[in-house]
Amino acid sequence: MRSLLKVIYRYRAFFIFILLELVCTYLIVRNNNYQGAAFFNSSNALVGNLLETQSGITGYLSLKEANKELAAENARLRAELDVLEDVADTAGNIFRKTVLLEDYQYIPARVINNSTRRYNNYLTLNKGEKDSIKAGMGVIGPGGVVGRVKAVSENFATVISVLHNDMLISSQVRRTGYFGSTSWPGKDASTAELKFIPRSESVMQGDTIITSGYNAVYPGGVLVGIVEEVKLREDASFYDIKLRLSTDFGNLSYVYVVENKMKEERDSIENVAITP
């Protein structure tokens, strides 16, 4: 122990230098957007290979469960298609949801890292720029909404999870069509809150909450969750609504990155409209 203290004392200037370098690097990355983004993307590429190797091993061991997820999703999509084929509009023509979603393309990806116990949670995907993935794209899974792409390297992408303080999802009550916003209050990875539903509207336990389609990130109609609890304080203008999230973030193996082919055109015309 005495020898170790002597070594530390002898090279104290070097150790202090290294400590100050680390502190400076942390402050630069944290307080400068460009350096922060560069660091985030670089760490993406470096850590991504290690995570992919680890995920490959665990993924092989969980193939049975992953196949069950995919089979369940295929069954759900098949059932929805059968229903849609039987639904007619007022003119008597067949209404197909695929027509409404033709502007979207889905890029499959595997989750190679995932956190659920932090206040701000992220996922890492094994797809990146070479697969046409860009920052800002939405991410959905077999159960519904998963998150939004934060940063991309050539082969990997990090995703802001729904379980993140900065994540806000434009949502809609399927039964009534009224819309609000879904956010995660922290702690429980299986629940979220639906906000800005006024007391004048009807919302009840068991209502299905879906994406509204009012932004260019997700198509409308993607599952967000089910209303689990509805409260209304006497002096409140809006309900306090608790949702049971449709996505099981603790058991997420495969996702789809959503590319909106019309996003740039839509953003440009909307920017023109709001520019004074």
Image (spheres, grey):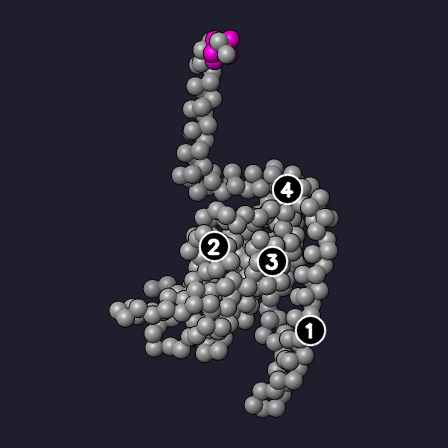
Residue 5 seen in render? yes
Q: Position of residue 116 (x, y in %)?
A: 52, 50
Q: Which residue is mark 4?
A: 51
The residue at 44%/33% (across/down) is 26
Stretch of the chain drawn in magenta: 3-8
Of callouts 2 and 1, which one flags the residue occurring earlier in the amino acid sequence? 1
Is residue 244 shown in magenta? no
What is the number of the mark on residue 78?
A: 1
The numbered disc on residue 188 is 2
Q: Tell whether label 4 touches label 3 (CB within 8 Å).
A: no
Q: CA distance from mark 3 to mark 1?
A: 21 Å
Crowd class of label 1 (few under 14; some 14 to 19; many from 20; radius 10 Å) = few
Q: Earlier in the sequence, mark 2 or mark 3?
A: 2
Q: What's the residue type where badge 3 is placed?
A: Val
Residue 9 vertical placement versus 144 (above, below): above
Q: How many marks are shown on the rendered structure? A: 4
Magenta stretch, main secondary structure class: helix
